Image (spheres, rainbow, N blue to C red):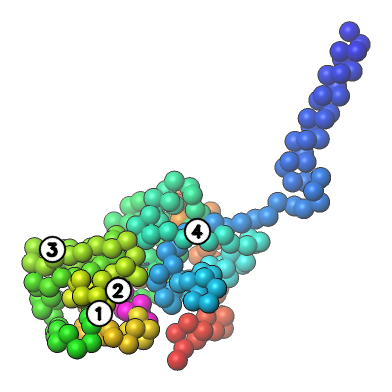
């Protein structure tokens, strides 16, 4: 009887020690890291894109979320790259803590996720091949054209709403695919966010912006619906950053000439 009691006590103590060790308090000598898991779609320069030389995901949004996370006491961020269309489902499924992807705050999206205060403004731009002769002075001029968009974006939603009956709309999983389709003549135009269209027109000599659709969009950082604690922390950090010289440095780094 006594042996069994002694045996059970040993088992109890050992399991307690194991539990404490695996919780990260003792044992390995390291404390648990605080990691913010960030979802993005890295084909949206200068907000998020893959560095041409090393393939690392970088950009305005990436630097911004790192600053936000640091202010909030996180040790590091972990970036998960996916198609734009998968970002909100990933947030809802708890696969990522936040989404930063030049994501426009829209009433439809606000039904399923919560957004931070706005941090950037954008319109939609019409990108065509140089020398295509396509002239656009209103959205009507795109009627009958083949238009490429990225699936799930505000550009795609706008084009479908205004030209859905009169034009052929091709949806691509990424902008890279949409721009390629434009370059090789599969579509006549690509409709996408104006700051990104400007970057693409600088990168690819053969495309140009011929029209801007004034949609007046605002970008926000998204969190899972109801995650008030995280959202409050993000908003506080974001406000501080936007009112500090760090913000101007960031803007200059990614938008400066
Ligand atoms: N701002 C656009 C949207 O929210 C496009 C964002 C993106 O493609 N990364 O739909």
- The residue at 14%/87% (across/down) is 133
Residue 127 badge: 1
Q: Relative to residue 111, is residue 250 depicted above or below?
A: below
| Label 3 to label 2: alpha-carbon separation | 20 Å
Circle 3 is placed at which residue position? 164
- SS at mark 1 in the image: strand
Circle 2 is placed at which residue position? 179
| Label 1 to label 2: alpha-carbon separation | 9 Å
Residue 239 image offset from top left, x and y in percent: 51, 72
- SS at mark 2 in the image: helix
Instruction: State left or right for residue 173 relative to residue 139.
Output: right
Residue 26 image offset from top left, x and y in percent: 81, 45
Q: Tell me which label, 2 or 4, sits earlier in the chain.
A: 4
Q: Is residue 21 magenta?
A: no
Q: Which of the four quarters of the rendered structure image does ligand 1 lie in?
A: bottom left
Furthest residue in direction front, as rendered: 184
Q: Tell me which label, 1 or 2, sits earlier in the chain.
A: 1
Instruction: State left or right for residue 160 relative to residue 88.
Output: left
Magenta-drawn segment: 193-199
Q: Nearer the viewer, residue 185 or 224?
A: 185
- The residue at 44%/85% (across/down) is 255
Q: Relative to residue 23, is residue 52 depicted above or below?
A: below
| Crowd band around label 4 with a 10 angstrom C-alpha radius: few (<14), some (14–19), many (20+) | some
The C terminus: image quadrant: bottom left
Residue 205 image offset from top left, x and y in percent: 32, 87
| Label 1 to label 4: alpha-carbon separation | 28 Å
Residue 80 badge: 4
Whether pointer 1 and pointer 2 mark residues with C-beta atoms closer than 8 Å, the reply is yes
Say whether residue 204 is visible: yes
């Amino acid at each position: 009887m006594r042996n069994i009691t002694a045996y059970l006590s040993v088992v109890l103590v050992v399991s307690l020690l194991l539990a404490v060790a695996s919780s990260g308090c003792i044992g390995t000598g390291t404390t648990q890291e605080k990691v913010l898991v960030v979802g993005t779609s890295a084909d949206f320069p200068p907000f998020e894109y893959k560095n041409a030389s090393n393939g690392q995901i970088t950009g305005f949004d990436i630097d911004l979320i790192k600053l936000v996370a640091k202010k909030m006491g996180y040790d590091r961020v972990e970036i998960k790259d996916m198609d734009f269309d998968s970002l909100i489902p990933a947030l809802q499924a708890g696969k990522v803590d936040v989404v930063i992807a030049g994501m426009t705050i829209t009433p439809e999206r606000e039904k399923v996720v919560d957004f931070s205060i706005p941090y950037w403004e954008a319109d939609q731009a019409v990108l065509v091949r140089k020398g295509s002769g396509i002239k656009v002075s209103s959205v009507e001029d795109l009627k009958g054209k083949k238009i490429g968009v990225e699936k799930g974006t505000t550009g795609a939603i706008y084009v479908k709403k205004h030209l859905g009956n009169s034009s052929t709309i091709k949806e691509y999983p990424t902008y890279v695919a949409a721009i390629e389709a434009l370059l090789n003549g599969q579509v006549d135009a690509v409709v996408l966010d104006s700051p990104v269209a400007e970057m693409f027109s600088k990168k690819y000599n053969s495309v140009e912006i011929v029209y801007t659709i004034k949609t007046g969009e605002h970008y926000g950082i998204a969190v899972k619906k109801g995650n008030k604690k995280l959202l409050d922390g993000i908003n506080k950090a974001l406000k501080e950053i936007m009112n500090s010289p760090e913000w101007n440095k960031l803007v200059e780094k990614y938008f400066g000439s």
